[in-house]
Structure formats: structure tokens, C-alpha cells
Image (cartoon, grey):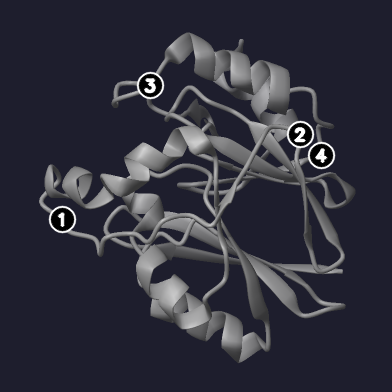
Amino acid sequence: MIQILHLPLGPLQTNCYILACEETMQAAVIDPAWNGRSIAATADEKGYAITHILLTHSHFDHVGGLAELKQETNAPIYIHPDAVTMLSQADMSARFFGLTVPDPPPADEMLSDGQTLNIGNITVDVLYTPGHAPGHVSFHAPAYHVVFDGDVLFQGSIGRTDLPGGDYNLLIQSITDKLMVMPDETQVLSGHGPATTIGAERRRNPFLQ
């Protein structure tokens, strides 16, 4: 069995998720958006050991809690190679919005399309889904019909492409080729806003019609 904890954090209410295997009590943190100590404390209260820190991409609002979380857990940080440069610029990017984030530590492990990760007994597939940001990936747990897609697909919308490295056509291709091939019942847990499903977005998302 799996447990998914949803934590909207920071000034942009970015969704951080804790994906936990209840058989082994191992867990991954997906996008430590803000307040890494609070994320670590939430996992600790549930008895989960954080074994992975997974980044869908490295926009500052998705990594604002990374430094604290790494300090608290020393869990390895996973990122796509194309997102490394933006990670190193996170604080500079935040300052454009009048915010600051602690300088993120460097990643420990590089992700690649089609790679498989094991969070306890949970198998997670890495999907390369660029278009919103360089090196954007999604994390798909097919046995549990859930995908953590960062800022690719939202309820009734898609990720913005007007930021550095954004590409509208590439984003639509990522959604079409990597997400829309999933079963309709697949839950889509995005970087902002409520959960949705592949089927609901296939039928109603105006960007996909």
C-alpha cells in the first residue's frame, strides 16, 4: 500500500508530496517547495524515513525547501541533468519575484527518461516531460495509477511556457506522448492546484482539444 501526503507550501502554494511505502516505511519527497524542516517533521510524525528527494524541475518555488530538507535527512537529491543549471540559479530567480530561498545543495543523482526508481516496494518510472522548464520530468507509479507531473498538466490548464526555457509546442508534445497515453483513471498530482485525472483532462482540458 502507498500513502500520499499533499503539502501546499510557500508563497506560491506549490504542491509538495510525500510518497510513502507503508510496508517498508520508506518515502520520497517530490518537490520540496518550501520549509524543508516542516516537510521532514511531517514525515517523521508518520514514522517515514525519507530515502529520496525527487525534483520534477528546478524553478525556485519547487526547491525552496531543498536545502533544509537535505540538511535534516541527508537523502539523495535526484534531478534531470538539463535542470542542474537552473537549480544553481534558484535564489537569483526568486529575487526577481521579491523572494529569497536558501542556496540549494547540488544534486546527488541524475535522472533519465525511462529510468525506474524504487521507493520501498513502490516502483516509480521517470518520464522526461520538457516544455515548461529545462529538464522537467514526471514521476509515474503505474501500479497505483498516479503520476506526479510537476507543472506540465493542471486541472483545466497546462504549465506556462513564457519563462526561460519554456516551449509551448514541446510541452504539448510531452503531454500528448507521455501523459495522454495513460489510462483515464490515472490521478494527476500537479505542482499547483487540485488533483485531476487523465480522463477528465482528455475530455475537458481546452488546451488538448
CB-based contact (under 8 Å), mark 3 and mark 1 = no
Query: Which residue carries the number 2 mark?
Result: 114
Which image quarter is the N terminus in?
bottom right
Q: Amino acid at mark 3?
A: Gly
- Identify the residue at image location x=13%, y=49%: 95
Specify which label sits upstream in the sequence, 1 or 2.
1
Q: Callout 2, which amino acid?
A: Gly
Would you name the residue on which mark 4 appears? 185
The residue carrying mark 3 is 166
User: Which is in the foreground here, disc 3 or disc 4?
Assistant: 3
Specify the amino acid type for callout 4.
Glu
x, y (%) of residue 89?
26, 44
Q: Earlier in the sequence, mark 4 or mark 2?
A: 2
The foreground one among 135 and 180 is 135
Label 2 or label 3, whichever lies nearer to me, is: 2
Which residue is tagged 1?
99
Residue at screen point 53% across, 82% down: 42
| Mark 4 Cα-neighbour bin, 10 Å: few <14, some 14–19, many ≥20 | few
| Residue nearer the viewer, 180 or 117 | 117
Residue 71: quarter of image: bottom left
Give coordinates of residue 17: x percent, y percent: 57, 61
- How many other residues sit within 10 Å of disc 2, few (<14), some (14-19) or many (≥20)? few
Residue 77 percent coordinates (x, y): 53, 59
